[in-house]
């Protein structure tokens, strides 16, 4: 009975939350319809696994709401050959989504207490093309750069140059920038060696990444 309820909740999530939020990429729809999000949610919150809400995962961190995850995946237009960098592993659910769509994922997690659980959950889903590293993704370029795709799972006051420089030409990055309560999801595309295009996607709000730099302010 619990399994049936979760299956129905997953169906409702996809067709009542995600589709109605202008997510039309069928690959993303199919993925979220098949991958059991409840597998990645802490036991105390499994009944909320498919709800339109952020879910606590410990240490003050949360899973993004499902529709934000879906919009991220759609915006990045991930191809089967893509090498992907994820900043912030958390529960491992988005890591799993990225791995299902792309070729390989390198996921950087600053809080090592999340890593054993996330790795176990990825293993439980048979996902072998994702590597979790205990690193601060804002401190320096990741080994393996440049990347086709970068997914940033927390917010920053402004776009980070270290991350931008790790994109291949043609590479895409999803990032949320700004300061509460005014934040915007953006798609950054590297269009040349020294040229990036930034597209505003939608307004939202995400927790600030650990060790995020303060926004530069001018004084007169």
Image: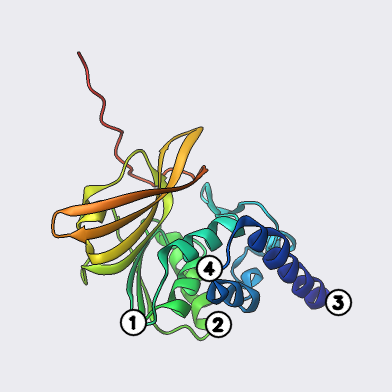
The spot of residue 81 in percent (x, y) is 33, 82
Residue tagged by mark 3?
A: 1
Q: Residues within 10 Å of mark 1 (few under 14, many from 20)?
A: few
Viewer-nearest of discs 1 and 4: 1
Seen in the picture, residue 1 relative to 87 is either above or below; the reply is below
The spot of residue 35 in percent (x, y) is 60, 77
Residue tagged by mark 4?
A: 93
Seen in the picture, residue 32 relative to 174 is either above or below; the reply is below
Residue tagged by mark 2?
A: 124
Seen in the picture, residue 125 relative to 172 is either above or below; the reply is below
- Secondary structure of the residue carrying numbered label 3: loop
State which tag comes first along the sequence, 3 or 4.
Answer: 3
How far apart marks 3 and 4 lie (CA) works out to: 24 Å
- Secondary structure of the residue carrying numbered label 2: helix
Q: Residue at x 26, y 55 (%)?
A: 163
State which tag comes first along the sequence, 1 or 4.
Answer: 1
The spot of residue 167 in percent (x, y) is 24, 63
Proximity of marks 3 and 2: CB atoms separated by less than 8 Å: no
Viewer-nearest of discs 1 and 2: 1
Q: Residues within 10 Å of mark 2 (few under 14, many from 20)?
A: few
Residue tagged by mark 1?
A: 81
- Secondary structure of the residue carrying numbered label 1: loop
């Amino acid at each position: 009975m619990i399994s049936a309820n979760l299956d129905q909740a997953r169906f409702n999530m996809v067709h009542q939350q995600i589709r109605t939020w202008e997510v039309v990429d069928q690959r993303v729809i199919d993925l979220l319809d098949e991958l059991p999000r409840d597998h990645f949610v802490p036991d105390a919150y499994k009944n909320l696994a498919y709800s339109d809400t952020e879910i606590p995962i410990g240490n003050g961190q949360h899973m993004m709401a499902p529709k934000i995850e879906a919009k991220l995946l759609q915006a990045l237009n991930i191809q089967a050959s893509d090498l992907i960098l994820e900043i912030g592993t958390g529960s491992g659910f988005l890591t799993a989504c990225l791995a299902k769509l792309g070729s390989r994922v390198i996921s950087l997690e600053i809080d090592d207490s999340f890593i054993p659980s996330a790795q176990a959950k990825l293993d439980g889903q048979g996902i072998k093309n994702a590597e979790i590293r205990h690193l601060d993704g804002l401190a320096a370029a990741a080994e393996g750069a440049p990347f086709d795709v970068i997914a940033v799972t927390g917010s920053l006051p402004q776009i980070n140059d270290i991350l931008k420089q790790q994109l291949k030409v043609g590479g895409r990055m999803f990032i949320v920038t700004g300061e509460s309560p005014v934040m915007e999801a953006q798609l950054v595309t590297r269009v040349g060696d020294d040229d990036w295009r930034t597209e505003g996607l939608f307004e939202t709000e995400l927790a600030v990444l650990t060790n995020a730099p303060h926004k530069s302010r001018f004084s007169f």
